[in-house]
Amino acid sequence: MSDDLLKPRFPLGGASPFRSEYEGFSISESMANSFVWLACRLNRQADFERMAREVFGFAMPGPGGLARRSAYSTFWTGPGQWMVVAPFSCHRDLETLMKEGFGPSASVTDQTDAWLRLDLEGVACHTVLERLVALPLHTVGEGSAHRVSVHHTGCFLGCLGMADRYFLLAPRSSARSVFHALRQAAESVLTPLAAPRHPPVSGLSGGGAPHRG
Amino acid sequence: MIIEHPLLGPRDAQEFVYLGDASLIDRPDGMAEDSVECFHDYLYLRSNPAGLHRELWFHEGGDRSWLVVTRDTVTHEIVKVELAADVARQRGRCR
């Protein structure tokens, strides 16, 4: 089998991460992180909380919260459930690390490659996002993350800076749809800095093998 | 319609999916002698009040929690919102 068939694609279908720039706003595709879902098991809450302090050095964030320290960041995704994010370069085996760290107090599910991460930056973040998500954005400050619906697709929106740095996690299987929604919202109010470039049509949003010929 | 989520605050009803009467929480014991009659009532008999109604809503576009929403079916006013897990525990369930 020839090697070129095994080259991985980015969630938006390209061979490199995609980026769109507007006046005061940019969207960048990122594959730099590992993700796992962490769920506290029934009647194990005390153990789980103790392990969390040992593994992360902080208590798990409450509803709508996002906590960060050293390489780890975690955000609340539902009652007793959190997403854990760490750099892929040094935490390739995040699932194993979490299983070892939390033992039988938690259930761990690998989510790496299941999500498209888009980094949103710029002073116009609110101008674009307020057209897409039903959240009072002034309450989504640094250290908060929420599940939101973007064109009826469940995504996570987290704030990393004051009001000018956000990340949006979209299911990889709906990557191009969510990206389209985001770009449509941006183009309705902002001027692109370069001629709009579209993700390659031949690439599959599900990350499957590229078309040949 | 806005639903006041007990954990997340006011959220648009578009994020939720409606299931039905909150009495669905009280699933009968399948091993009881009268289980056939109990399950018949559980599955098919629903009251359809013009007024306050307790119903199950799922926060599908949010934190995926189940809620018990007390809603006035005449005015659509939402009187009370609770986590279904809390309601189940109050009724003696372990979760």
Image (tube, coloured by chain):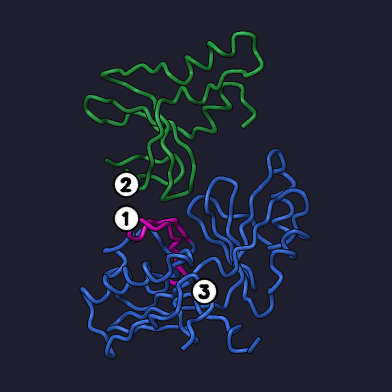
Chain colours: A blue, B green
Label 1 vs label 3: CA separation?
29 Å
Quarter of the figure that contains the N terminus of chain A = bottom right
Closer mark to the observer between disc 1 and disc 3: 3
Q: Quadrant of residue B2?
A: top left
Q: Which mark is residue A154?
A: none
Left or right, residue A180 beside residue A202: left
A9 or A55: nearer the eye? A9
Label 2 vs label 1: CA separation?
9 Å
Label 3 vs label 2: CA separation?
30 Å
Name the residue rendered at 77%, 49% in the picture: A104
- Prevalent SS, magenta region: strand
Question: Which chain is mark 3 on?
Answer: A
Q: Helix, strand, or loop for circle 1?
A: loop
Residue pointed to by mark 1? A134
Three-letter code, disc 1: Ala
Three-letter code, disc 3: Gly
Disc 2 with disc 1 on a shared chain: no
Name the residue rendered at 27%, 90% in the picture: A195
Circles 2 and 1: CB atoms closer than 8 Å: yes
Q: Is residue A120 above or below residue B85?
A: below
A170 or A44: nearer the eye? A170
Disc 3 with disc 2 on a shared chain: no
- The residue carrying pointer 1 sits among few (fewer than 14), some (14 to 19) or many (20 or more) residues within 10 Å by Cα, namely some
Residue pointed to by mark 2? B14
| Magenta-drawn segment | A144-161
Question: Which chain is mark 1 on?
Answer: A
